[in-house]
Amino acid sequence: MTEALARRLYALALRLLTPAYLLRLWWRGRAEPGYRTHFAERLGYGPAEPLGRLWIHAVSLGETKAVEPLLAALRERDPGLRLLLTHGTATGRDAGHALLRAGDIQCWQPWDTPGAVRRFFARHRPSVGVVMETEVWPVLLHGAEQAGVPMLLANARLSPKSQRQGQRFAALLHPALGRFATVLAQTEADAARLRTSGAATVQVAGNLKFEIALRPELLQRGRTWKAQLGRPVVLAAVTREGEEAALLEAWRTSPRGAALLVIVPRHPQRFDEVAALVSASGLRLARRSGFVADAPTVADRTAEVWLGDSLGEMPAWYALADVALLGGSFAPLGGQNLIEAAACGCPLLMGPHTYNFALAADLALTAGAARRVPTLAHAVDEALALLNDGRARETMAAAGLAFTAAHRGAAARMAEAVLALRRR
């Protein structure tokens, strides 16, 4: 099948799915009202904007947090930069609002149909487009080419699993990857897989997530909670569906003493679901949303489990914890970003599934900042053992700080590549 035919069939399928797509967004808006805002932007509608902005697409919360150091590096080099920031999720858009300056604008990523993409480029006419990590939208990239907008894929990664899955749609995805003027890969292994999958110009620039800037007030918030608690804390960080039930069973039956378990789910729409799981386990629950003036009440401090049902506070949770368990790594989901934990000096235990962050996981293990365990039950046992081994925790914390500091520099390299593309 030719690329043109594959793209037309794909576009036709998405046109037919547009009503279902919009209905799904409206449905998600029940739990996250942000999905129901600026609805027409999903189809590329909106007033015309001044042309020439740098367009950065950060689909969700993780990509939006990762783009912050790149933006800082770009603005250091070009103080007059004007930004168009797009997202696909409500949490990403909420977080992205804090990155805007006077003259910047923010909107939803257009649905990947020819009409929505055409209207998007006619409305904004950016000078360069920067897409974060893994977002390869065939119609959008073809539309950028037609509009004369050079595209760059930043902080790019491609796991072996994703590469295998992509082979089934090679006629569509390989030409789409080839439309990026530049691909900035996180690792040599990612670069090799991206070249094999159709990317033409690939450079290894490192991982922006090592550039993480931790807000001091959040770290202090976590330390204050810790002082108020006076108890050891095990954090289950950025958990995914299917992990919490197994974790709670292991915790409930463990000799945990006075230790507190904190669970921070990855998806905010699951907060109530996880709260129900905790209550059903018979463990006493306190929710972050119930704190008074950002501080736990007396009743909160005696709970057996805290639920981190807030957004943007992960550094505070890591500063609170004595040891963390990495969510998404105990089910075959590929893990989550572990760099933030290391940068906060929080010892980390990982499950067997970290393929989305394979190099970072291997580097953290080699540095001594993290340990790997086979199951959540083993993770609970190991975490409780670490609570009684202050020297081991101190060693892991120092290793995490050194490990993250040693891998900085990606933001500067990527900023130079973006500005070079803009000057062409």
Image: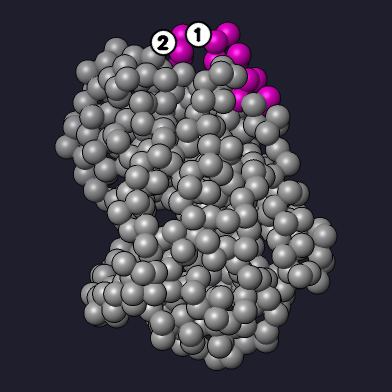
Q: Nearer the viewer, residue 220 or 269?
A: 269
Residue beneath the point at 34% across and 14% down: 381
Q: Is residue 378 visible?
A: yes
State which region is magenta: 385-402
Q: Main secondary structure of the magenta part?
A: helix
Residue closest to the eye, 153 or 341: 153
Q: Is 67 situated above or below 317?
A: below
> Which residue is painted at 62% across and 63% down in the image?
181
Residue 368 position, x and y percent, is 56, 17
Q: Is residue 209 magenta?
A: no
Q: Which is nearer the eye, 353 or 2?
A: 2
Image height check: is 191 above or below 341? below
Image position, residue 341 (x, y; %) = 54, 33
Q: Is residue 217 above or below residue 97?
A: above
Circle 2 residue: 385
Residue that label 1 marks? 389
Q: Quadrant of the N terminus?
A: bottom left
Q: Give the colour scheme shown.
A: one colour
Q: CA distance from mark 1 to mark 2?
A: 7 Å
| Labels 1 & 2 near each other (Cβ < 8 A) | yes
Secondary structure of residue under mark 1: loop
Q: Residue furthest bottom?
A: 47
Q: Is residue 136 visible?
A: no
Residue 200 at x, y percent in the picture = 58, 56
Quarter of the C terminus within the rendering:
bottom right
Callout 1, which amino acid?
Answer: Asp
